[in-house]
Amino acid sequence: MSHAVPAMSTVEIQFDPASLVLINLLLAVMMFGVSLELRVAHFSAILRAPKAPVVGLIAQFLLLPALTCALIWLLPIAPELGLGMLLLAACPGGTFSNIMTWLARGDVAVSVSMTAVSSLAASVLTPLNFAFYAWLNPKTQALLSSIHIAPLELLLMVLLVLGVPLVAGMWVGRRFPQLSQRIEQPLRWVALAVMLGFVAIAFGRNWSAFVAHFHLFFYLVVGHNALALLVGFAAARLTGLNPAQQRAITLEVGIQNAALGLAIIFTFFPQATGMLLIAAFWGTWHLVSGLLLALYWSRQPLPVLSEAKPCA
């Protein structure tokens, strides 16, 4: 594969800077919609039954970024593609992991708890993990240095599109519970549809570039997503969590917030074509892989456990 990797700087991507406002707004709306059903109890539940959420968070914010960094080190890929993989690995769980966990007959309480905590933690850990592992890896270090990213600006951006909508959604959900129940699911689906439409337009405007380099990012995204799912499953299985918790953590770690990755790329790395190729395709593929896995698990019976382990 090494002989087939071109310099990504030679690939031109058409991008309208005005789209930045739209994608950040969509991400904030998705986060707001997810947070309508969150309560303080979801956070305090981790203190009462911390094992499953903590295992999942370790897999998500420690194991996956570290293994991704090692993978990029070993594979002969363009630095921009590697940087895109690192960014996705540093992102928190995606907003649809809760729905997929429900479809998979997994522990929804664990999934919701992880979504809540990881979304808050990502305000700090996403910029920190991304900057650290991109600096640590010799393949991406030079590229990161040439971009001159401002850590405080990245931190502020993640806070605005994740932290603020999360707090606002929790407040609205507690203050107007009937309203939140009516609009929570429609908000998720509408935001997802618009986001997929945004990705589709980006693919359409740059179809020739995507087709020409499909062989470079397709296997990376599919393999990287498989690694994320495997990391979540292995961490849960090896620590003795029950099957429902294993399913929840697998999907939470494997369904990354690609929308956040795209927002960061469009804001700070608009010329980084390789990063865009990775994040745009990941945003579509992880929905496919997650739904397929959830549908498979939905047909697999869970053993009846004598000990209930609710997280909320």
Image: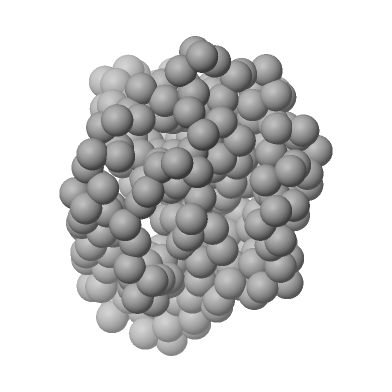
- Tell me the residue at 67%/45% (across/down): 143
Q: Is 144 drawn above or below residue 170 in the view shown?
A: above
Coloration mode: one colour
Q: Is 72 drawn above or below residue 133 in the view shown?
A: above
Q: Nearer the viewer, residue 303 or 294?
A: 294
Q: Residue furthest bottom?
A: 175
Q: Is 60 drawn above or below residue 70 in the view shown?
A: below
Left or right, residue 37 beside residue 80: left
Spot occupied by residue 136 in the image (x, y as percentages of width and height): 80, 38
Q: Nearer the viewer, residue 312 or 162?
A: 162
Spot occupied by residue 300 in the image (x, y as percentages of width and height): 32, 18
Residue 24, by quadrant, is bottom left
Q: Is residue 75 visible?
A: yes
Q: Nearer the viewer, residue 300 or 70?
A: 70
Residue 76, by quadrant, is top right
- Tell me the residue at 61%/18% (across/down): 75
Label count reads 0
Q: Nearer the viewer, residue 99 or 222?
A: 222
- Location of the C terminus (image quadrant): bottom right
Spot occupied by residue 287 in the image (x, y as percentages of width and height): 32, 39
Spot occupied by residue 18 in the image (x, y as percentages of width and height): 35, 75
Residue 151, by quadrant, is bottom right
Left or right, residue 6 beside residue 280: right
Q: Is residue 188 visible?
A: no
- Tell me the residue at 58%/46% (across/down): 87
Q: Residue furthest front?
A: 10
- Tell me the residue at 21%/53% (across/down): 205
